Image (cartoon, helix red, strand yellow):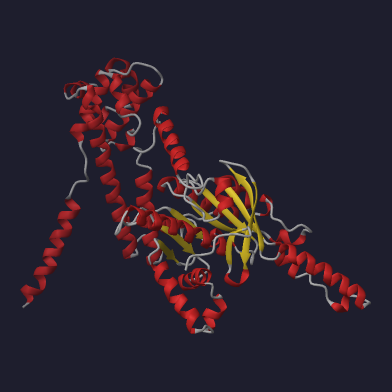
Amino acid sequence: MSMTQTQPARQEEETLLSLSLRHPPANLEAEQALLGALLTNNRAYDRVSDFLTGAHFANQVNGRIYDAIARRIENGQLADPVTLRAELENSGILNDVGGMAYLAKLLTSMVGIINAGDYGRAIHDAWIRRQLIDIGENVVNSAFGTISDLSGPDQIAAGEEALFRLATEKGQDGGFVVFDRALTDAIKTAELAFRREGHVSGLTSGLRDLDKKTGGLHPSDLMILAGRPAMGKTALATKIAFSAARALMIEAEEKGPGVEPTGTVAIFSLEMSAEQLATRILSEQAEVSGEKIRRGDIGQKEFDRFVRVSRELARLPLVIDDTPAISLSAMRTRCRRLKRTRGLSLVVVDYLQLMRPSVGTRPESRVLEISMITQGLKAIAKELEVPVIALSQLSRQVESREDKRPMLSDLRESGSIEQDADSVMFVYRDEYYLQQRMPKETAFDSMEKYSAALDDWQRKMSLVHNKAELILEKQRHGPTGVVHLFFEGEYTRFADLDMVHEEPHH
């Protein structure tokens, strides 16, 4: 009996021992062969210089020799055993490997200049594997509680952040784009706009006049949509997200039955639950007030319309993540996963002041924290090549002015938001402020004066009723200005402002 009890324990011990005895991945032959090639023909450096550094070598001596070679070549000098001799001997780099005889050994294991790139990539690949082992060890030690006091979800985010950093900083991405290729891409974008109805090169926002000014929502752009509470930020962002998702679905349907949309619209709703947001979209599309839906105060006819619209909406490529106080690293991971599995066309964040920066970072101030978040959102837009719309709060100083139209300086922790954004839009409704200024009878000493003030107020109200302004305060790719919109408070719905705007399809 005691034998059967100790056997699994012994097997586990042996497995752990064999794991600990395994050597980290390294390709010393490739390191020596590459150094030999560089010492023989400095032009081989061009094939590895954009992704390889001395830190990537498993053998520290090889790495320091590579850095010494690189320094001379970067300075326009010749790097060979003769020119390197003084530096290598004085620094004592070669003391542990047999002195200058080691360089002679390297020359015998050289490879041709053509193979230098392959050897460089083999060295780099072994380095990535070693980094993965380090990250894995940290994750294990952190989970055992030996090196960290982070909670479980925070440990996941920290692990994801470390992996993301390795993926983005591995040094192989980027580089110059030949102008010819950049021109081809620009012409393709222009052709797309020319062929599309409404001449929109990006994804449609569902608002005609906004699309005219911006050309639609463009990949890699970070757009900030800001406003004071009750202005309709969430309603407008939801309208844009819904319209983009519907455009993706229509595009797929036009290609034929069963064709899946090429991308998804992701909404990160940090303030409202997924259910509340879904109710808003349903209310807007079914033209049933959200208040009535919540109270269950709807007739059979409205309920049938509600069900029919919900079936249509269920087919939309729209996903909602309502994790409160989501961190930047978690958002990035979820977006990358979505892009890989279902495609990603637009990201909406409601709203950025409720986000946390990446796990493991501790900004000194709120301004620095917001700066890290906006930079991170711009990085997501660029890396995943999707437009990102981030909603933002405005400071209270708006309320103290006579003209309450927002300005760039009203953005909370404004500097970094304004700097990182490709466009900044403010949503403003005069009706909201005017409504609060309704004349009170007690404020007047006669009925005539009160009636005159009331008439004047009603006249002003009729001019701004159901109207909203979208103020484009900054736009990198086009003009700034004001887009006038129709706003229906009952259904929290935005639409184009004109007398013959298209009725929603039911």
In the displayed image of the protein, which residue is found farthest to the right? 445
Q: Between residue 460 and residue 305, name the one nearer to us.
A: 305
Q: Tell me if residue 9 comes above or below residue 370 in the rendering.
A: below
- What residue is drawn where x is 39% and y is 22%? 74
**What percent of the width, then of the height, locates residue 430?**
71, 62
The tally of labels here is: 0
Q: Is residue 148 visible in this depiction of the protein?
A: no
- What residue is drawn where x is 38% and y is 56%? 333
Q: Between residue 465 and residue 118, name the one nearer to us.
A: 465
In the displayed image of the protein, which residue is found farthest to the front? 500
The quadrant holding residue 18 is bottom left
Quadrant (top left, top right, bottom left, bottom right) of the N terminus: bottom left
Q: Between residue 307 and residue 440, name the one nearer to us.
A: 307
Q: Tell me if residue 121 comes above or below residue 470 in the rendering.
A: above
**What percent of the width, then of the height, locates residue 175?**
39, 33
Left or right position of 8 against 308: left
**What percent of the width, then of the height, locates residue 279?**
49, 73
Q: Is residue 199 visible in this depiction of the protein?
A: yes
- What residue is drawn where x is 11% and y is 65%? 10
The quadrant holding residue 128 is top left
**What percent of the width, then of the height, locates residue 303?**
47, 80
Q: Tell me if residue 357 comes above or below residue 418 in the rendering.
A: below
